[in-house]
């Protein structure tokens, strides 16, 4: 068949059909099933997109970013579609389709400049196949690694274009690559480590006499200019943007001494992650694991053979094949060295962008290896079809998998009951916002990795500064307010006693949700005050705990217990013996700022005071001193309580 002047073979027709099926199939899967397996990370991306749409901006000061500032990111795409629809699910579907098309276009451009158009549709199809859990979750469904892959491939495209140009066109493209690298660098160091440093290292390698006819000098210039732009952008990121926006600059990462154990663990981690990324799984010999592991081993073998053949036949292969191979090898080498000599946290999913380099490598190898064309083509086609079968099997296995069904039901219950604001731990907060189509605004109080993690929360206003609104740090829910716990969190939170009589609006084996009329009602319930528990000789001078009461000797002082108090009226009640020989003060904060306490009742066995707060105070301290001048004087304190009387 001919299209214009170009002849299209049956192989390419079938390849394009496979690509179309994989692309449309994945889009349809997002449309039908994505709401079954949402994660808070994924919902955070869409939530930020909605904020950017409201602000008509590319970056937001009202957002706690994670480990990097999201400059060139899916959030821009989400934001764009929010201008046309208020359906969060439709925004997700349209944005996913848009990301897929962008990736496809960039990969097509790479196939043109590197001359593997014949195998473009076949290898492009793999980008839209869930060949692993990591790729499925963080690229196809979540989109987090979409910009890393696209920027890497796009940089390789413009590098190849630059090598073909001369004169002012070449200079203009070089300037464009410099400015583009600066913009990329504004987002942080990730692309610097994953693209620009390996590219520079690869171009330096290609200057060696060992490699000929690869335009090494010109490629080196392009790589050096792009690296410089990326570094400039990164410097702006950590020196200027870090002062404006909330994100982690990884300033705590440091160089470490070389350790053979760490080096071995990084290499082992890459091998393991390469396998896991391609779907290596444990299981019975003749089961789904067999297909997964065959695909895994085949892609590893294909990548190794592609790199080995390129270096072995460097004088025969095309310069483009040599450059892509050098870049891939440099990426893996730098990856091992960097994570071996730095304290940077390592996660196997970081290899996703590296693994995706196997696809153009395989296409270049199949097109240039000194085999019969039928053999090389058949080998690559068989591998892609096996991968597609693995992907189909993955979709089938996940088709009825719906761990988020109850969270969708919870979102409906909360909205129907008139709740729009509330609290939850990280893994549920932003998901509830998406499932409620943006109706629920949820304050994230901790990461919620473990059920016992919520015990770290002593102050409900101390938000988790990670993937949520910055305004949550200083504002409180308005109107009816809910507090969502998992069953484990409900059993391990710090407010079990206070919540015994609270209204329960939802209860199951997995979740429990408490409802309050407003924020003040929530605070009255969680923080009615406190009772000082004696017994461990804490915060006492010249005194001691005897049983369940405290004795103060001459000049002895009892302090503490350093609690947070909310605005409102409080009553202090102290019971004991010889209390008329004491002086009582109340203060808060590091500077011990005094709070006026009005006496209500004073005798040897009972002291009562009241005070009122107009603002929240931290580290409240009750100071009780034995002021008797008699050496034999003892003050016994049986109990101390500070209770809220009336909330403001």
Image (spheres, grey):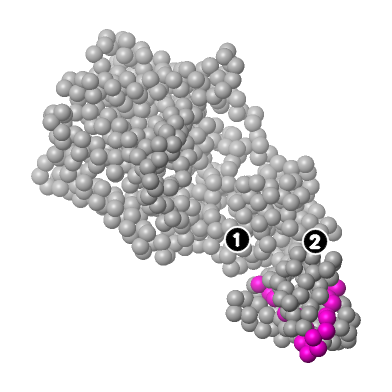
Seen in the image, is 645 located left or right of residue 152? Answer: right
Please tell me which residue is depicted at 38% across the width and 34% down the height of the picture. Answer: 354
**How far across and down, in percent of the image, does residue 447 sit?**
60, 51
Rate crowding at label 1 as few (under 14), some (14 to 19) or many (20 or more) other CA atoms within 10 Å: many
Give the mark nearest the N terminus, 2 or 1: 1
Please tell me which residue is depicted at 83% across the width and 81% down the height of the picture. Answer: 634
Q: Which mark is residue 233?
A: none
Residue 528 in view, yes or no: no
Q: What is the chief secondary structure element of the magenta stretch?
A: strand
What whole-number distance in Å separates the C-alpha atoms at marks 2 and 1? 21 Å
Q: Name the residue tied to disc 2.
A: 498
Q: Is residue 629 magenta?
A: yes
Rate crowding at label 2 as few (under 14), some (14 to 19) or many (20 or more) other CA atoms within 10 Å: few
The tally of labels here is 2
- Between 334 and 256, the residue placed more toward the observer is 256
Q: Which residues are magenta?
A: 619-639
Question: Circle 1 sits in a helix, a strand or a loop, which is it?
Answer: loop
**How far across and down, in percent of the image, does residue 193 sit?**
34, 44
- Between 572 and 392, the residue placed more toward the observer is 572
């Amino acid at each position: 068949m001919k299209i214009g002047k170009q002849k299209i073979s049956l192989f390419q027709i079938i390849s394009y059909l496979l690509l179309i099926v994989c692309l449309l199939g994945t889009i349809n899967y997002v449309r039908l099933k994505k709401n079954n397996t949402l994660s808070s990370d994924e919902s955070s991306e869409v939530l930020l997109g909605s904020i950017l749409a409201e602000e008509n901006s590319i970056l937001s000061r009202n957002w706690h970013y994670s480990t990097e500032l999201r400059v060139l990111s899916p959030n821009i795409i989400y934001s764009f579609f929010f201008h046309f629809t208020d359906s969060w699910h439709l925004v997700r579907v349209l944005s996913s389709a848009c990301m897929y098309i962008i990736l496809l276009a960039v990969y097509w451009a790479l196939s043109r400049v590197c001359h593997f158009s014949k195998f473009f549709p076949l290898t492009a199809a793999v980008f839209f196949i869930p060949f692993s859990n990591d790729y499925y979750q963080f690229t196809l469904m979540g989109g987090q690694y979409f910009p890393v892959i696209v920027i890497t491939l796009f940089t390789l495209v413009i590098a190849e274009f630059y090598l073909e140009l001369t004169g002012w066109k070449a200079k203009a493209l070089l300037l464009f690559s410099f400015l583009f690298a600066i913009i990329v660098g504004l987002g942080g160091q990730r692309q610097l480590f994953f693209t620009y440093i390996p590219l520079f290292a690869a171009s330096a390698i290609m200057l060696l006499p060992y490699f000929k006819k690869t335009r090494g000098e010109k490629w080196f210039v392009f790589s050096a200019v792009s690296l410089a732009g990326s570094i400039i952008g990164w410097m702006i990121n950590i020196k200027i943007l870090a002062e404006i926006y909330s994100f982690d600059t990884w300033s705590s990462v440091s160089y470490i001494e070389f350790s053979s154990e760490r080096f071995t663990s990084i290499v082992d981690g890459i091998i393991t992650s390469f396998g896991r990324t391609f779907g290596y799984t444990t299981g019975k010999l003749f089961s789904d694991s067999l297909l997964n592991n065959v695909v895994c081993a085949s892609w590893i073998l294909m990548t190794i053979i592609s790199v080995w053949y390129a270096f072995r036949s460097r004088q025969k292969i095309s310069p483009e094949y040599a450059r892509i191979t050098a870049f891939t090898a440099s990426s893996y080498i730098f990856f091992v060295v960097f994570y071996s000599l730095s304290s940077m946290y390592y996660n196997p999913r970081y290899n996703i962008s590296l693994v995706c380099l196997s696809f153009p490598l395989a296409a270049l190898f199949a097109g240039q290896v000194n085999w019969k064309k039928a053999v090389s083509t058949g080998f690559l086609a068989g591998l892609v079809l096996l991968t597609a079968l693995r992907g189909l099997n993955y979709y089938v296995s996940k088709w009825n998998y719906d761990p988020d069904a109850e969270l969708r039901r919870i979102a409906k219950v909360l909205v129907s009951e008139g709740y729009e604001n509330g609290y939850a731990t990280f893994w549920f907060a932003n998901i509830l916002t998406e499932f409620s189509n943006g109706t629920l605004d949820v304050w994230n109080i901790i990461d919620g990795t473990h059920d016992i993690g919520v015990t770290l929360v002593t102050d409900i206003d101390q938000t988790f500064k990670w993937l949520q609104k910055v305004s949550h740090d200083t504002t409180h829910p308005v109107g009816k307010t809910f507090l969502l716990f998992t069953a484990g969190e409900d059993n391990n939170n710090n407010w079990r006693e206070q919540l015994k009589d609270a209204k329960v609006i939802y209860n199951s084996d997995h979740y429990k949700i408490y409802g309050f009329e407003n924020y003040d009602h929530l605070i009255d319930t969680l923080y009615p005050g406190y009772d000082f528990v004696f017994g461990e000789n804490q915060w006492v001078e010249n005194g001691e705990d005897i049983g369940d009461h405290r004795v103060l000797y001459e000049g002895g002082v009892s302090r503490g217990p350093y609690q947070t108090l909310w605005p409102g009226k409080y009553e202090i009640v102290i019971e004991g013996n010889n209390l008329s020989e004491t002086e009582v003060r109340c203060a808060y904060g590091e500077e011990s700022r005094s709070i006026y306490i009005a006496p209500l009742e004073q005798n040897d066995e009972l002291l009562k005071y009241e005070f009122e707060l107009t603002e929240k105070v931290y580290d409240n301290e009750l100071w009780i001193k034995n002021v008797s001048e008699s050496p034999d004087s003892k003050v016994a304190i049986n109990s101390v309580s500070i209770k809220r009387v009336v909330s403001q």
